Image (cartoon, rainbow, N blue to C red):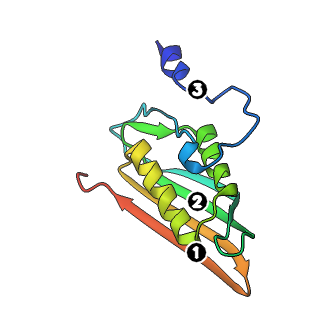
Amino acid sequence: MRKKKINSLTLLGKPVSELPKSPGKAKLEVFKNNFPKRNYEISIDCPDFTSLCPVTGQPDFAEIEIIYVPDKVCVETKSLKLYLGAFRNEPSFNEEIVNRILDDLIESVHPRSMSVIGRFASRGGISLTIKALHSNPSE
């Protein structure tokens, strides 16, 4: 029975030769949270995030940190890695990126709470940090 639950994941354990063309084409997969009665925090760090400036087309570099308290499911990290990698070809402002990541993860994971923090590398002597927050009002 346990294998059946794991077999529902389509990306884990399988070779992937290319990133999705865009975050919208990426598939965020989830698996059952085996401790749904417990509040515990999951912290995911992506220190090598890349996106494109929508004005100049130049790459923006950032560290993306995702912290959440799961409810019924958890995000599978390989699918998350591919999703985040898809931003490499996506022209977006930094604020849009962080809020989109939060919105997409909320839609997939339905967490009790979640924050997404984007620490973008300095450009012209200014670095930018964006923190988007979500808390489930039913909790």
> What SS does tag 2 mark?
strand
Real-space Cα separation, disc 2 to disc 1, in angstroms: 11 Å
Q: Residue at x 65, y 46 (%)?
A: 21
- Residue under pointer 2: 65
Label at residue 10: 3
The three-letter code of the residue at mark 2 reads Glu
Residue 109 spot, x, y in % from top left: 42, 43
The three-letter code of the residue at mark 1 reads Thr
Q: Circle 3: is it few (<14), some (14-19), or many (20+) Cα within 10 Å?
A: few
Label at residue 71: none
- Residue 16 vs residue 55, the one in the foreground: 55
Between circles 1 and 3, the one closer to the viewer is: 3
- Residue under pointer 1: 129
Q: Earlier in the sequence, mark 2 or mark 3?
A: 3
The three-letter code of the residue at mark 3 reads Thr
Q: Residue at x 74, y 86 (%)?
A: 124
Residue 1 spot, x, y in % from top left: 46, 12
- Residue 16 vs residue 37, the one in the foreground: 16
Q: Is residue 113 above or below residue 59?
A: above
Between circles 2 and 3, the one closer to the viewer is: 3
Asked if disc 2 and disc 3 are in contact, CB closer than 8 Å, the reply is no
> How many circles with numbers are drawn on the protein?
3
